Image: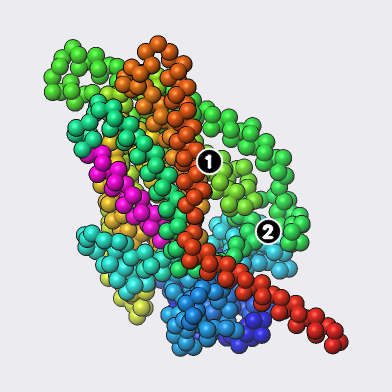
Amino acid sequence: MAESWSFLDAFEHNFRPLVVIELAKGTKEETIEWFTKRIVDKKAKGGAQLLIKPLVTENGDENIYLVGASHLRLLLGAETVGLVKECNDNSMRTFTYSSRKTFRDFADDNHNFLTMAECQYIIKHELENLRAKDEKMIPGYPQAKLYPGKSIVRRLLTSGILVQIFPLHDREELKKLRHSWYGRVKVGYQPLDEIRCYFGETIALYFGFLEYFTFALIPMAVIGIPYYVFAWEDYDKYVMFATFNLLWSTVILEVWKRICAIMTYRWGTLLMKRQFEEPRPGFHGVLGINPVTGREEPVYSSIKRQMRIYLVSLPFVCLCLYFSLYVMMIYFDLEQWALDYHEENESNFSSLMLFVPSVIYAVVIEIMNRIYRYAAEFLTSWENHRLESSYQNHLILKVLVFNFLNCFASLFYIAFVLFDMKLLRQSLATLLITSQILNQFAESLLPYWLQRRHKKRMKKRMCSLKTDMDLSLVEQVNLEKEMGTYFGTFDDYLELFLQFGYVSLFSCVYPLAAVFAVLNNITEIYSDALKMCRVYKRPFAEPTANIGVWQLAFETMSVISVVTNCILIGMSPQVNALFPDSKMDLVLTVALVEHLLLAMKFIMAFVIPDKPRDIQIKLAKLEFESLEALKQQVRASDMYNSEK
């Protein structure tokens, strides 16, 4: 592969812009010249060996650059990042340039062998791996220090010289995707393979999980409707519904693992080897030597980090949890006031007033969740985690703990302290429906309306220009660079996690929860598709083999739901009537049932394989072939050495 780099040229007539780089206005010429030279330099000289072209705007500024790559460069990049493609024998293998002819649909003149998302991912990888050699600073900016091995792009970003890097949309492909995805209302599956080709595996997996979760909710919704209508106080059906709820929450998560394995094998990411994780952009410290790589990089004391976590972050999170509980008690005071007002007046207006405290509390919960999210991001960044995975794990833990308490504490208090099932049903319904409406408005409708306004203003300004520039490309870049940035699937998965909690924890008390969840998710699919295609800049594709830590979060919620539903059953009047003399017998019986259900749950999780049998065989076959190839290499090396 090393010999192949020499065939690449720094210029290609059919330049295809894939990625946009926006520099700060007024960036010094020597900085621009140095940075662009590093982008086009040969790999042997420490460059990225990509193509770059300035985009002259209406003001004549050259702070926006378009980045592309030759076809050969992208193929060699695909080998570098370890992309997995389908071979002619239907197997999935890591792409290598030397064996390119063995891969399906490959041809030297077929520039569509790699999807546009894969090409943009390769360019992003190469740009992020541009590293300083002997430079001590960014040319023209002595305050922006460099050291050997430091990522140049990350230093430019943290210094404010580089504003943003984002991949361009493909207008024709996006138009086709919009038509097949959300252009018309239809009953059917989403085009997940097309979504994956355009946006990458991470986003495709989210939409696949959203679709799967929606279909998985349908049995709960179908059973819940007649139960809601006919069986509020029917003990037998009450227990049956709760038991079905427990089995359902286990089965759907185990089946999802299998579906996820099938999809990611087909997409190639199930086989991708995990690369060595580089330090995250915001990580800082004194310059030292990494004992694993031997490279110079910032080093930060783990003791200092632990002190920040346990002496600052943990007390802050506890304080926020206390404040959340304090707000909850204010909500109960409002509930009591509304109840007293209704008992005094007993009118239609007073009946409506009974729902006002829950609506206000639901709005306050959403506001508190969003404010806390910013605080959690600041604290987690301040903790100075070296790896992005560590940063994400600590952030998710902080956010999940607060959101769980903030959203569900009032329901637990009503159920297990006040023992008011009527108020529990009312509060659960109000919190669920209000949060769904607020999320739809804040995440999709409002950003879409703002984006439409900005697009109209931009088109008017572009039409007033009199220039020979390629207006379609200039207009596209100017429109997209002002679009909002999609920060990943965190908030989307969090919304589904909370929804799963509402459905699994207390759905036997309010069985229509699954019905409202299904209706919300149907609209969520269309609104999320709209925001991905029309509201936000195109995100870079990120290969992934599963939904990550969110799988563990959902499984933890399902375990909590077992305990919750068992206690709810034990609190019912019918069950209490079976133990009139001894409450201790009741507690022991409920605890026994709860342990049996948990045991059944873990047995089911163990019995249902995470990967289908055919996928296991294919993975084992690939592992065997890799070992055989390694043995042959060792034998060839030994024979060569013996002949010497």
Q: Nearer the viewer, residue 451 or 386?
A: 386
- Residue beneath disc 1: 397
Task: Give percent across and percent down for residue 38.
Answer: 62, 73
Q: Are marks 1 and 2 in contact (CB under 8 Å)?
A: no
Q: Which residue in the protein does label 2 denote?
A: 145
| Number of residues whose C-alpha sits closer than 10 Å to that of mark 1, classed few (under 14), some (14–19) or many (20 or more) | some
In terms of secondary structure, where does tag 2 sit?
strand
* Residue pictured at 46% horizontal, 41% vertical: 601
As helix, strand or loop, the secondary structure at mark 1 comes to helix
In the image, is residue 203 above or below residue 249? below
Residue drawn where x is 60% and y is 55% of the image: 281
Q: Amino acid at mark 1?
A: Leu
* Picture layout, residue 166 above or below residue 582: below
Please indicate, yes or no, whether residue 199 appears anywhere in the rendered image. yes
Q: In the rendering, at what x and y percent does residue 249 appear? A: 40, 43
Cα gap from disc 1 to disc 2, whole angstroms: 34 Å
Q: Nearer the viewer, residue 435 or 422?
A: 422
Instruction: Look at the image and give the residue range highlighted in magenta.
Output: 201-225
Q: Residue flagged by tag 2: what amino acid is it?
A: Lys
Closer-to-camera residue (50/593): 593
Q: Residues within 10 Å of mark 2 (few under 14, many from 20)?
A: some
Q: Quadrant of the C terminus?
A: bottom right
Instruction: Identify the main secondary structure in magenta.
Output: helix
Q: Can residue 136 be found in the magenta stretch? A: no
Residue at x-position 72% and y-position 64%:
148
- Tell me if residue 406 comes above or below residue 464 in the rendering: above
Query: For residue 266, which numbered disc appears in the image?
Result: none
**Mark 1 or 2, nearer chain start:** 2
Horizontal and vertical percent for residue 139? 65, 66
Q: Is residue 376 visible?
A: no
Q: Magenta stretch containing residue 209, yes or no?
A: yes
